[in-house]
């Protein structure tokens, strides 16, 4: 029986219904549904005959508005995610300008009268400054978002290339017979360039990793910006060769105009950094979700209870009066309604502070787990042994091509080994193909991840049923063969064949580019899969520091071999070296280095398989 009118509150809440009237009244309720209807009008449904009051249709309107608002927020998130990814790719297309060093490196020998050791000192300074601060920039990305780093990188890029342009314009230094700027100023300029490279690269990669790190296609979404980084040297070297060149007296095209080229890079990269301040954004809700999932995983493992600093989420929620698992929602609602505005603001600040402490604690804990995991050191060792020779080859492509050119070759005649810009393009294209190919194939064939923390596996967690329905291949199945191809490239260079057939140097460049690109594509993907994306910037930054030492080591070895060969009778009047001794022993050492890296990665793979980690 319906209650009387005097029992009904005069104020109708949006969660209440009119108790004096059935929601779906019909003939069986004794109510004439046709009352007041025009007998000659078209029949209407029972729902259309209801005349809602403002209070009765309030709930429906609120539900519709909530659905629209939810869809709007979801669309806004996707727009931010896609736009940030697009600008991340553009950022990487500009950030790898240092990979075109071999385009103008040989001109430092002839125009600025630098020795080969000095040219390598400049490239090593850029390489070391590019890799050493990566962990610091990754740490800042994880905790303060990539936007500030984008602005910082653009500023440092602009200052570095502007200083390099001025130093080059002033001519040879005093200790080389000129009256230009001292050599150390060029080193400082390229230290700025290297630092800005790592800063801009980390900002773009971290944005893509955190926005797509848990998706189905995380491999390809990371491989695309990484591939774009490799492509940057290709298109920038082509711009320098065919647009920003010196015009000879006869009107033909000469070498790249280094001054104009450096000014172009300074303006371009400063603009990319400024736009990246607003364009590189992480979807905050996704990042918070990843943090919460990781914390809940630790709660289930019991590790949080061992910490005297961190309190589990359940205690935090109970302390702040949010919905707890006990289900006493009525008391929580009354408590919230009783709070004053000041108390609500204070509670919001405390909750935000607790979330920040939670994030910092989790990221610091994951960093400790990462550093204590011995497989991380095997992975980093292999990365060091592979990327060091690769960096040295890329930085010295110009002198390698010159060493393969017979001394009897006319000065203005094209080298049978090809132009340095052509080799830069070759290594960029093969590296890009390798990054995209390995990233996409590893996404398709890789087994599903089984747990977040390899140090604390959950054997009760079932694996995906799709793993038994299709062929699965570990990402190491792509990494190891790629490294083997890389070693074949160095082995070919160490053989007498390139001297007899200089055109084979393009094969060497292609093999090295493919193996080098695969390593830079698969290693960060493996890190994100094994150790998660919550602390990806820091973890990848730590591993990415190792190529700094590798580039310095193999760059010094190359310059020492080159200079000794030039001083031993294989040098020409312009200071360039010709013949096998200029690079042969160095190439043999690079081959052995890559083989040791393959053994290190295989050891790492076996350890993961024993622990049940799906890679």
Image: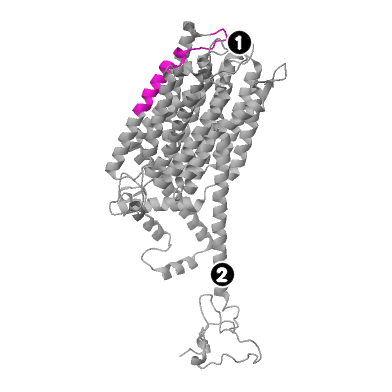
Mark 2 lies on a secondary structure that is: helix
* Residue 375 seen from this side: yes
Q: Please tell me in which quadrant of the rendered image residue 496 appears.
A: top left
Mark on residue 64? 2
Say which residue label 1 marks. 174
| Horizontal and vertical percent position of residue 423 | 54, 26
Q: Which of 521 and 270 is in front in this view?
A: 521
Q: Where is residue 80 in the image (x, y as percent from the top left)?
A: 56, 50
Colouring scheme applied when the structure was drawn: one colour
Q: What stretch is highlighted in magenta?
A: 572-596
Which residue is most to the front? 501
Q: Does the magenta stretch include residue 355?
A: no
Tag of residue 242: none
Q: In this view, does 2 lie above or below 463?
A: below
- Label 1: how many Cα within 10 Å (few below 14, some 14–19, many 20+): few
Q: Which of 293 and 257 is in front in this view?
A: 257
Q: Which of marks 2 and 1 is nearer the N terminus?
A: 2
The correct choice, above or below, for 58 with respect to 303 in the image is below
Q: Nearer the viewer, mark 2 or mark 1?
A: 2
Query: Which residue is more in the foreground, 421 or 167?
Result: 421
Q: Where is residue 324 in the image (x, y as percent from the top left)?
A: 39, 63
Q: Nearer the viewer, residue 517 or 118?
A: 517
Q: Quadrant of residue 188?
A: top right
Relative to 421, is 449 above or below?
below
Q: Does 199 sit left or right of 357 as displayed?
A: right
Q: Distance between the residues labelled 2 and 1?
A: 76 Å
Image height of 408 relative to 542, above or below: above
Residue 512 position in % (x across, y down)? 46, 28
Q: Is residue 259 left or right of residue 419?
A: right
Residue found at x 41% / y 37%: 523
């Amino acid at each position: 029986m319906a209650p009387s009118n005097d029992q009904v509150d005069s104020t109708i809440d949006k969660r209440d219904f009119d108790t004096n009237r059935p929601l779906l009244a019909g003939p069986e309720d004794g109510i004439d549904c046709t009352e007041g209807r025009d007998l000659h009008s078209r029949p209407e449904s029972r729902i259309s005959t209801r005349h809602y009051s403002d209070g009765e249709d309030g709930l429906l309107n609120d539900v519709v508005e909530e659905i629209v608002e939810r869809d709007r927020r979801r669309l806004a998130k996707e727009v931010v995610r896609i736009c940030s990814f697009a600008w991340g790719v553009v950022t990487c297309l500009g950030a790898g300008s240092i990979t075109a060093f071999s385009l103008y490196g040989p001109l430092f020998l002839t125009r600025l009268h630098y020795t080969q050791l000095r040219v390598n000192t400049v490239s090593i300074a850029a390489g070391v400054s590019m890799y050493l601060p990566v962990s610091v920039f990754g740490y800042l990305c994880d905790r303060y978002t990539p936007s500030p780093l984008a602005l910082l990188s653009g500023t440092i890029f602009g200052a570095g290339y502007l200083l390099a342009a001025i130093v080059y314009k002033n001519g040879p230094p005093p200790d080389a017979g000129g009256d230009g700027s001292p050599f150390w100023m060029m080193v400082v300029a390229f230290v700025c360039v290297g630092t800005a490279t790592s800063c801009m690269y980390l900002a773009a990669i971290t944005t893509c990793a955190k926005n797509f790190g848990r998706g189905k296609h995380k491999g390809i979404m990371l491989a695309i910006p990484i591939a774009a980084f490799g492509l940057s040297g290709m298109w920038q070297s082509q711009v320098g060769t065919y647009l920003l060149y010196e015009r000879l007296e006869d009107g033909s095209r000469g070498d790249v105009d280094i001054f104009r080229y450096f000014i172009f890079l300074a303006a371009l990269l400063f603009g990319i950094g400024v736009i990246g301040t607003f364009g590189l954004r992480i979807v905050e809700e996704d990042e918070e979700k990843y943090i919460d999932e990781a914390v809940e995983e630790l709660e289930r493992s019991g590790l949080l209870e061992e910490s005297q600093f961190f309190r589990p989420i359940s205690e935090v929620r109970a302390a702040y009066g949010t919905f707890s698992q006990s289900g006493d929602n009525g008391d929580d609602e009354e408590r919230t309604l009783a709070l004053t505005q000041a108390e609500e603001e204070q509670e919001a600040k405390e909750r935000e502070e607790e979330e920040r402490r939670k994030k910092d604690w989790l990221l610091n804990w994951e960093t400790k787990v990462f550093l204590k995991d011995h497989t991380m050191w095997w992975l980093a060792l292999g990365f060091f042994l592979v990327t060091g020779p690769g960096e040295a080859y890329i930085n010295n492509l110009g002198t390698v091509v010159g060493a393969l050119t017979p001394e009897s070759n006319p000065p203005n005649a094209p080298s049978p080994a090809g132009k340095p810009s052509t080799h830069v393009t070759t290594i960029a294209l093969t590296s890009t193909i390798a990054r995209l190919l390995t990233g996409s194939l590893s996404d398709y064939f890789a087994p599903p991840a089984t747990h977040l923390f390899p140090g604390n596996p959950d054997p009760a967690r079932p694996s995906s049923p799709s793993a038994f329905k299709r062929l699965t291949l570990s990402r190491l199945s792509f990494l190891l063969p790629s490294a083997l191809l890389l070693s074949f490239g160095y082995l070919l260079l160490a053989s007498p064949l390139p001297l007899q057939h200089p055109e084979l140097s393009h094969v060497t460049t292609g093999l090295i580019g493919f193996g080098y690109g695969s390593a830079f594509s698969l290693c960060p993907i493996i890190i994100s899969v094994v150790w998660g994306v919550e602390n990806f910037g820091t973890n990848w930054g730590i591993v990415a520091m190792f190529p700094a030492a590798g580039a310095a080591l193999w760059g010094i070895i190359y310059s020492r071999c080159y200079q000794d060969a030039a001083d031993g009778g294989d040098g020409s009047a312009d200071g360039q070296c010709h013949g096998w001794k200029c690079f042969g022993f160095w190439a043999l050492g690079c081959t052995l280095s890559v083989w040791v890296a393959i053994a290190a990665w295989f050891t790492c793979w076996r350890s993961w398989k024993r622990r049940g980690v799906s890679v």
